[in-house]
Image (cartoon, grey):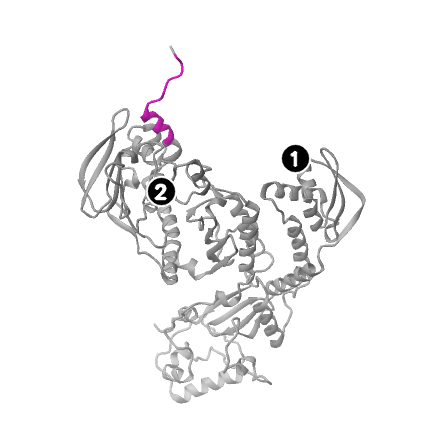
Amino acid sequence: MSKIIRLTTRLANQIAAGEVVERPASVVKELLENSLDAQATRLDVDVEQGGVKLLRIRDNGLGVNEADLPLTIARHATSKIHELEDLEGVTTLGFRGEALASISSVSRLSLTSSDNESGAGWCVQAEGRDMEAVLLPAAHPQGTTVEVRDLFFNTPARRKFLRTEKTEFSHLEEIVKRLALSHFDVGFTLRHNQRVVHALRSATTEAEQDRRVATLCGPNFIESAVRIDTQTDELRLWGWMGLPTFSRSQADLQYFFVNGRSVKDKVVNHAVRQAYRDVMYHGRHAAFVLYLELDPKGVDVNVHPTKHEVRFRESRQVHDFLYRSLHRAIAEMSPADSQPVNQTRTDSGFNPASAAAAPSALHPFNASPGLAVGSGEFRHQNNLQFTQPKSTFGERQVADTMQVYADLHTPAKSASPMAEHEAGETPPLGFAIAQLHGIYILSQNQHGLVVVDMHAAHERITYERLKSSWQDEKIRSQPLLVPLSMAVSSREADFAEEHLGLFQKLGFLIQRMGPETLLVREVPILLRDADVETLVRDVLSDIVTHGSSDRVEQSLNELLSTMACHGSVRANRKLTLPEMNALLRDMEVTERSGQCNHGRPTWTQMSLSELDKLFLRGR
């Protein structure tokens, strides 16, 4: 008896389902991608019990005619590719022809569709050991409806791996969010147990796109993000970049799309981490929604059955483009990008006239014998229990109180910068009004109060100037008194020999002395005391993995960062108002001035509305 047998159609499909269908979210992904490929502009998703009991997806796409309908649930049957060459430039989300066959083998699936507006359509189901298609007439508008019931009902071992209803739905919702972010021109509705979770209209204008991103990623993200759009002859990158101050403890708000397909790629992740590295606090993650567009022939999507991974044919070009674009966008972020938008106030602010009308707001406690006013210090002898006045002050008492505050204030000898610029526009960081404990600068701008960490801000300014100065002088090398011999693998030696020019640009002079031996003769002058062997190995590793390396630049930046830290103003250094204002102006023109060299924020804004809430104004 032959030991090799031909598998049944159902068993073959169930084996394929192990790769394609992991959980209800996988089913939704495949079905929604089919609908989007069918040019649908409206998608309705109904879910029950996290998708295990029922998944129903309805679209208004092109639909399927009666003759083709049985082929929709046949394995390796698709309308999206016809020849081997078609795989070199796939423009659709799906192309394998495995999804519906795999899903129908582990669930009770019915597909109803119509390719015209007559209202008459057909329904197909797969039954029996050989999954023979059963075709029945059905009423249906143009488009397609797919119902998937009792997922994994015939594979109980697979069903045991499913999580709770809440967990499975959260994965499913994430799939819908990703597709909604990649197809703004399509409306989405998601219901779970007859409750509407998302109802998204199509978004064509920038304002509508901002609104959709805010709905799916949170309003805080869109308020703390800048929109970018950069393009070369072959590549285009656009989307939303979160400000470095809007960092996350997890990489849970990172969406990257290649030609409309959500992907997770190591080249992309490495480029993004590099771009944010100089401004991101240790252990934090950036937030972004970015879209890369390129020739479909420049990316291979036939890498993994789930199509989450892609392979770029020119990965180094893509990596360099992403890094340069994001790095430049971060460098161009200014304090103006972080200003609050449309701040509304319940009150127009402090006004002597309004204070006279409501003197209790001006003087919130009784002037009692236990309270000393006039020395700049308030003291109370009754356990600091301030009480509200029982009656309002008269005009004379208000005038006396105002005079007390006037005596505490020493007028400046010269006009303040704020006064000089009353008629003009206030700078983003405003004008300094005081220094707090020799650490913080207090500044007033048109939105409210700005608090600046003096040392952190000056550290970033000094750091950027050192980097600019070093880049202007280029990387200078110093010969080693005793050349360093390194034992490497033959593959690493081949890469080093192939990229000798790159090493020379980085300040290294390297020679190959044998099949597995490298000799380092020169190193960058600033890194002469560093661990040269480890640095060269890291550079080699980066070149092998990513086609380029910035290890030398990273090491140089770490050294310059240390120099900037020691060369910046320290705490308890008393600054004059002109010095503080000069520091604020330098921050406004310095790249990445929102964070110090270690990723900590250098300043924060407290709007007038936030200050009003602290003192219950307008309530």
Q: Quick one: 300 or 560, which is closer to the camera?
A: 300
Residue picked out by circle 2 = 29
Residue corresponding to mark 1:
491
Residue 601 in view here: yes
Residue at image coords 72%, 60%: 473
Residue 272 in the image, given as x and y percentages of width and height: 53, 51
Q: Nearer the viewer, residue 529 or 402?
A: 529
Above or below, comparing residue 239 to residue 584 in the picture: above
Q: For this view, does 100 lie left or right of residue 304? A: left
Q: Earlier in the sequence, mark 2 or mark 1?
A: 2
Residue 13 lies in the magenta stretch: yes
Q: What crowding class fits label 1: few (fewer than 14 Cα within 10 Å), some (14-19), or many (20 or more)?
A: few
Residue at screen point 68% across, 54% down: 559
- In the image, 433 versus 342, the foreground residue is 342
Is 149 located above or below residue 176 in the figure? above
Quarter occupied by residue 356: bottom left
Q: Give percent across and percent down for residue 21.
A: 36, 35
The residues colored magenta run: 2-16
Q: How far apart are labels 2 and 1 at the CA level?
A: 40 Å
Element at badge 2?
helix
Residue type marked 2: Lys
Q: Quadrant of the C terminus?
A: bottom left
Relative to 405, is 359 on the left or the right? Answer: left
Spot the residue most to the top: 1
440 relative position to 293: left or right: right
Q: Name the residue type under label 1.
A: Arg
Which residue sits furthest right? Answer: 481
Residue 281 visible, this angle: no
Quick check: is 598 in the magenta stretch?
Answer: no
Q: Is residue 396 above or below residue 585?
A: below
**What is the quadrant of residue 17 in the picture?**
top left
